[in-house]
Amino acid sequence: MSFTLTTPSGFWNPILWLVFLALFSIIAYLIYSRGNPSYKKDTEQIKPYLSGNPEPTKEKVQVKAGDIYWGFIEALKGYYKVLQAIHTGDMRDYILWYLGIGAIITFILIGGV
Amino acid sequence: MIEHLPALMIAVPLFGAFIAPIFKKHYKGVSIWAIIITGITVILSLLLAKEVVTGGIMVYVFGADKPTLVLPSGYSVPIRIMFEVDAMGAFMAISATLMSFVGALYSYSHVEKETGLEKYYSLLMLLEVGILGMVLTGDLFNLFVFLEIAGIAGSALVGFRNYRGEASEAGIKYLIVSAVASLMVLFAIGILYGQYGNLNLAYIARNISPNLVDMIALGLLFTSFAMKCGAVPMHYWVPDAYTEVPAGINPPLLVATYASLYALFRVSFTLFANIVVDLARVGWIMSILGVLTMFIGVTMALVQKDVKRLMSYHAISQTGYMLLGVGVGLTVLHDPSKLAEFGRDAMAGGVFHIINHIIYKSLLLMTAGALFYVTGTRNLNEMGGLARKMPVTTISFMVGAAAISGLPPFNGFASKLLIYETSYRLNPLLTVFAMVTSVLTLASFVKVFASAFLGPPLEKFESTREVPKPMVIAMIILAALCIIFGLFPNLVLDKLVYPAVDALINFAQYHSWGGLA
């Protein structure tokens, strides 16, 4: 059995890809192993320094899902306004969309355009 | 026994579904019963696929003296109900049985605290019957019957947690959408029956001489199956249904959706294969619907905060890839040079993406179910730092997320690569949309990973532990399949996908009842 997938314009061999992945992992590990040896786990060393202020609770410092990609969504506000407006959750709208698209597709198929 | 395999594929889960209520007071018993029955169907589907791939199309005529007797002496048209299984049908049957088995296994622990489990498992097996019937039948009316069975079982399962208002609402929406689509399918079947006096798919396909009424029937069938498979802009029911259904039912429900996609392909490639000029038009409609579906699905996913709803929008988005791949193939079906150059590979990409998506999306929805099982919420804003508490779920999620984003060497990559390359040949703009969709897919899964699994462990989840073993095993099976299918894409492509694609392309063979008539 061949591991190489031949596509219309090239090929893809996952085993070859894995070999390269292993090679790069070894290089990454070698770089990592040259890191600072004074780092010690589970000591005061790993605690955050907040200019003497007490550390807030984990809940308070958590980055919530709603905050991620805020900028992206804000930039596409106009697009999302339209998109969310058509997702009404109303069953009657679902059927209307179905009928509308059905009419368009049938119109195209019978040679309307 | 081998010649009865197509009938057994339906009979075994149907038997399982009718026996399940006997276990009313033995919830563990009914769970094990469902695992055994769905496990047997996996074996049967593998045997069926082996038989079809090696021996060609299998025809099974119900009620005939010999199950392969299509036309008894003196008859010129097929008059009995028959199943006609080609490689495409066998491919879908494997997907359906495998996902029903994994779903039953996952459900063992996931729904143990619910009541009415005998009904739950009975419906799960009926859903499997509906899907298998749809993908194995060679008869249009039976396609409608099994579509109804799958629709009713599916909607009952969506509304299974009837103590939740949202589940009941989603169940009713699913039921109405299914009923409307099924009735339109029935209407289209009526039109074809009126014209050709027969319900056999191959017979109608062989005799079809497209006219205005036929094209209306095609329009109705196309739109109905497109709505049932969640193509944009008729996808609105999908997030409701996938979000509210118990996570163990997500895999078979996904396959039920793709059984409609299969029906869409069967109608386009087999039933109306002879409409030479208009087929390219049908292919373009499919490709454009695909692009719309993938892009709008993923952009809607990006803004969701409910983890299952986010993944449900991704399910819509991924359907777009399948529509695009197969749509490209359909566009050039009657152009032999383009078909050989990229059409066949485009269809292989689309069909391969079906099984890949069923595997990784089921896995992802199961990880979402695991998060809900442990935290009691689906709101990503309320989760955090669960990676250390749920290592298997975390790794399973990472594998699924990488696969759905098309990262190498996971299974989504190979199918997407084929779709990118081939759709570029038809129109580069199609590929641009497909690639941007993949980037956005990865971005939205980074959002889930960062908010649910990464970060410091939250105090409220201090006592949280990994989900029970049956759920873990089901997730591991699917994660392993993501890796195996990704590392050895040729294994699946050569043994299952290309035979399935060739079965669609070589429609003349299907039209002759597998060479029997």
Image (tube, rainbow, N blue to C red):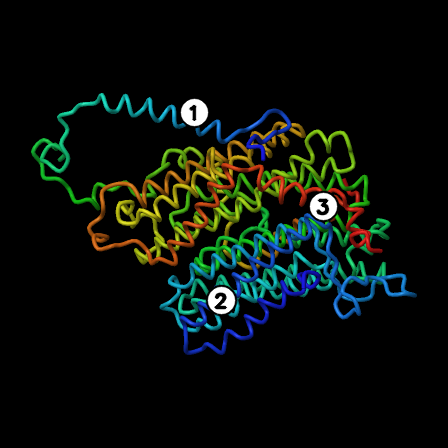
What's under tag 1, amino acid-wise? Phe
Q: Nearer the viewer, residue B280 or B87?
A: B87
Question: Is A62 placed left or right of B432 in the picture?
Answer: left
Question: Is B470 placed left or right of B299 in the picture?
Answer: left
Residue at (60%, 61%) from the top-left corner?
A: B178
Say which chain tag 2 marks. B
Same chain shared by disc 1 and disc 2: no
Based on the displayed image, in which of its 4 quarters is residue B352 positioned?
Answer: top right
Marks 2/3: CA distance? 32 Å
Res B470 label? none
Residue on which the image places disc 1: A20
Question: Is B209 placed left or right of B464 in the picture?
Answer: right
- How far across and down, in percent of the image, does residue B223 sit? 67, 51
Res B34 label? 2
Q: Nearer the viewer, residue B59 or B389?
A: B59
Residue at (64%, 51%) from the top-left corner?
A: B50
Residue on which the image places disc 3: B503
Same chain shared by disc 1 and disc 3: no
Question: Is B109 placed left or right of B80 in the picture?
Answer: left
For label 2, the SS is helix
